[in-house]
Image (cartoon, grey):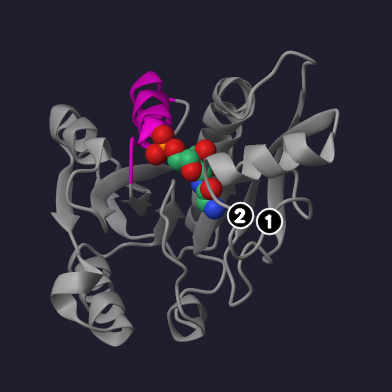
Amino acid sequence: MKQKEARVASIAVLVSGGGTNLQALIDAQKRGELHSGRIRLVISNTKDAYALERARVAGIESAMVLKKELGSTEAFEGKIRSLLDEYHIDLIVLAGFMSILSADFTAAYPKRIINIHPSLIPSFCGKGYYGIHVHEAAMARGVRITGATVHYVNEIPDGGEIIMQKAVAVRHNDTPETLQKRVMRMAEWKILPAAVEKVSSRLVAEGTASENHQ
Ligand code: GAR
């Protein structure tokens, strides 16, 4: 009997560092929790991102796109866009991607780029708030509740529509580092795969996802 054809969203994950959120997506895909989309490509904008090793181990194709080598934002984003075209990418996931994409870029993929941010937006977000600095700022302000947010990406840094959030309590003996780890474990690694599945299934339902044979 002819095998049934299924549509799944083709996903590219953009990374800059350790890639624990990429790993959470790979693991969710393995467990079948992420089934409406498939990670086809990992793009790093840094040379020694451990995320590239995670992609290699998982058998996912990867590419390095370095702004320094390309010389301009236009060339950098142009190279990323040509890779996204080449791999017929439907959904772009920013998972610890530490470069702000231009309005031209974000306008080309409306509601097709999502980002994980390590705070409850609209707190501690926007330009300058990334990685450990977010947790330093949250602790300096003395908030008792923080968390993580997955949102669509538009021309405003961390300003797009919110898809999912999860709160995490700050403990009295926390340091920015212990808080960062707990926010990742209790919030980021849970809501990112769930949000990617949610958006992928929307793209499939809308009939905009690439066709794949299973
Ligand atoms: C994560 O905490 C992610 O939320 C944050 O960087 C870390 C990357 O870790 N992203 C931002 O701050 C974006 N503004 P990872 O490489 O292990 O996934």
Determine the residue located farthest toward the front in the rendered image.
Answer: 140
Question: Which numbered marker is on residue 125?
Answer: 1
Asked whether residue 119 appears in the rendered view, the answer is no
The magenta region covers: 17-32
Q: Is residue 75 left or right of residue 96?
A: left
Where the N terminus falls, by quadrant? top left
The residue beneath circle 2 is 129
Based on the picture, tell me whether residue 18 belongs to the magenta stretch.
yes
Under mark 2, the amino acid is: Tyr
Tally of numbered discs: 2
The image position of residue 166, as x and y in percent, is 73, 33
| Residue 173 painted magenta | no
What is the distance, in whole Å, between disc 1 and disc 2 at their CAs?
5 Å
Return the x and y of residue 48 as percentages of the image width and height: 18, 44
The residue type indicated by label 1 comes to Cys
Q: Is residue 173 something that shows in the picture?
A: yes
